[in-house]
Image (spheres, rainbow, N blue to C red):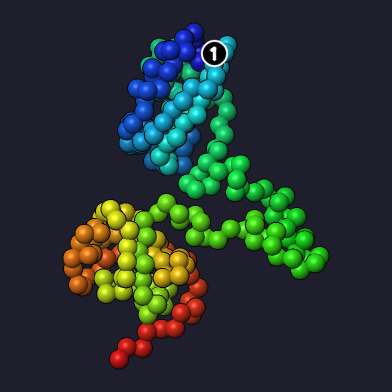
């Protein structure tokens, strides 16, 4: 971030603390979403270096937060303005840049290795299972007999559920999983964890996006 005036490190740190937590934010003019005020959560904001009005900081925030707007708003509070000079995403969900992110060159090398000698291990290292991306998403596990219906777009009813994570709330996006830990679909929770545990019937999850190919599990034939 580039400050448009002089400020001390203590003042910038104080503002970072003030801007931590839920904040109101209106997307900038050049944005891909409607320019309406919305609330975004800032989990942490740490000053790393500061010199010649240049501020290097690390921020952990809710998806959809505009960092250039964050810098602009902070500059307004300082009274002389500020703008974002450079943005580097070092983490997204469970993926971090120094552990499990790869470049297209890595993918190309893995593909050539597979074509050259049939070794698929480099490809498996680069192309990760979908389930890794769902690591932090609340999950609902279903019976094998319910999988094919979900793959055809059916909503998930309570009898098809065998177990689920705690603290699921209505409106949460949840991952529908097989008992083997395979991702079947993503959906919107229509009930809380407590309601699903207490009730015997009803639609618990509205299926939004199916990710498993049809036919991997046999359809339920009934009695």
> Vertical placement of 133 versus 28: above or below?
below
Closer to us: 176 or 171: 176
| Residue ID at (41%, 31%) | 44
> Vertical placement of 217 versus 49: above or below?
below
> Vertical placement of 189 versus 53: above or below?
below
Question: Based on the displayed image, in which of its 4 quarters is residue 14 positioned?
Answer: top left
Closer to us: 160 or 149: 160
Q: Is residue 162 left or right of residue 51?
A: left
Q: Is residue 83 left or right of residue 204?
A: right
Residue 36 percent across, percent down from the top left? 34, 37
- Kindly tell me whether residue 216 is visible in this rendering: yes
Question: Based on the displayed image, in which of its 4 quarters is residue 197 positioned?
Answer: bottom left
Residue 112 percent across, percent down from the top left? 77, 60
> How many dots with numbers?
1
Q: Residues within 10 Å of mark 1 (few under 14, many from 20)?
A: some
The residue wearing badge 1 is 53
SS label for mark 1: loop
Residue 10 percent across, percent down from the top left? 43, 12
> Vertical placement of 140 versus 147: above or below?
above
């Amino acid at each position: 971030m580039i400050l448009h005036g002089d400020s001390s490190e203590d003042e910038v740190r104080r503002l970072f603390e003030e801007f931590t937590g839920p904040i109101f934010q209106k997307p900038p003019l050049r944005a891909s979403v409607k320019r309406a005020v919305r609330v975004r959560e800032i989990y942490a904001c740490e000053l790393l270096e500061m010199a010649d009005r240049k501020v290097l900081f690390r921020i952990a925030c809710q998806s959809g937060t505009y960092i250039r707007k964050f810098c602009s708003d902070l500059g307004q509070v300082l009274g002389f303005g500020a703008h974002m000079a450079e943005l580097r995403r070092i983490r997204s969900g469970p993926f971090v840049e120094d552990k499990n992110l790869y470049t297209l060159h890595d993918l190309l090398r893995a593909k050539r290795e597979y074509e050259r000698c049939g070794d698929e291990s480099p490809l498996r290292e680069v192309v990760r299972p979908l389930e890794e991306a769902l690591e932090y998403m609340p999950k609902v596990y279903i019976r094998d007999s319910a999988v094919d219906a979900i793959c055809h777009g059916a909503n998930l009813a309570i009898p098809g559920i065998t177990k689920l994570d705690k603290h699921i709330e209505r409106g949460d996006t949840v991952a529908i999983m097989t008992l083997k830990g395979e991702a079947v679909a993503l959906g919107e929770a229509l009930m809380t964890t407590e309601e699903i545990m207490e009730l015997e019937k009803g639609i618990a999850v509205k299926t939004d996006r199916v990710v498993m190919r049809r036919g991997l599990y046999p359809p339920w034939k009934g009695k």
